[in-house]
Amino acid sequence: MGALGMVANPMRGEVEIVVDGAAYAARLSLGALAALEARLGADSLIALAARFEAGAFSARDVIAVLEAGLGASGWQGDLGAAEIGGGPVGAAQAAARLLALAFTIPD
């Protein structure tokens, strides 16, 4: 997938994330959400989403959400060593959007 043009379909719960100059369509599947909940020790996914809504998330939260979402696109790697499009703010926004779309019912 190239870095030019939108590769993600928001109607499918996908968010475009650019990692090291390449664009990926990230999405949180039910399995990814369950693994994310366990990885972050969240009481519930709603509690995790609330942390993002309240701005009370950590860099660890952001990386975990992005890695879970990027798994759907086949991406593998270490986000801690990667350059994410938009920097830390763009990464946090993408993670929040992934969580929001995971709990949105399409029209």
Image (cartoon, rainbow, N blue to C red):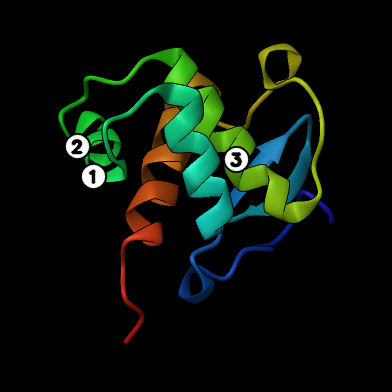
Amino acid type assigned to the residue bearing label 2 in the image: Ala
Left or right, 55 with reference to 86: left
**Mark 3 burial class by Cα count in 10 Å: few <14, some 14-19, many 20+:** many
Q: Is residue 90 visible?
A: no
Left or right, 107 with reference to 75: left
**Mark 2 burial class by Cα count in 10 Å: few <14, some 14-19, many 20+:** some
Determine the residue positioned at 48% across, 65% down: 13
Between marks 2 and 3, how big is the CA–CA gap?
A: 18 Å
Q: Which x, y percent locates residue 107?
A: 31, 87
Amino acid type assigned to the residue bearing label 1 in the image: Ile
Question: Given contact means CB atoms under 8 Å apart, are the residues at marks 2 and 1 in contact?
Answer: yes
Residue 46 vs 4, above or below: the answer is above
Determine the residue positioned at 31% across, 76% down: 105
Q: Which residue is mark 3?
A: 68
Q: Which residue is mark 2?
A: 50
Task: Please name which of the two marks, 2 or 1, marks the residue nearer to the observer.
Answer: 1
Between marks 2 and 1, how big is the CA–CA gap?
A: 6 Å
Q: Residue 90: which numbered mark, if any?
A: none
Q: Which x, y percent locates residue 104?
A: 31, 67
Q: Earlier in the sequence, mark 2 or mark 3?
A: 2
**Depth check: 24 or 77 in front?**
77
Q: Is residue 49 visible?
A: yes
Question: Given contact means CB atoms under 8 Å apart, are the residues at marks 3 and 1 in contact?
Answer: no
Determine the residue positioned at 80% across, 42% down: 75
Q: Quadrant of residue 4?
A: bottom right
Query: Dot 3: what SS?
Result: helix
Between marks 3 and 1, how big is the CA–CA gap?
A: 16 Å
Q: Residue 46: which numbered mark, if any?
A: 1
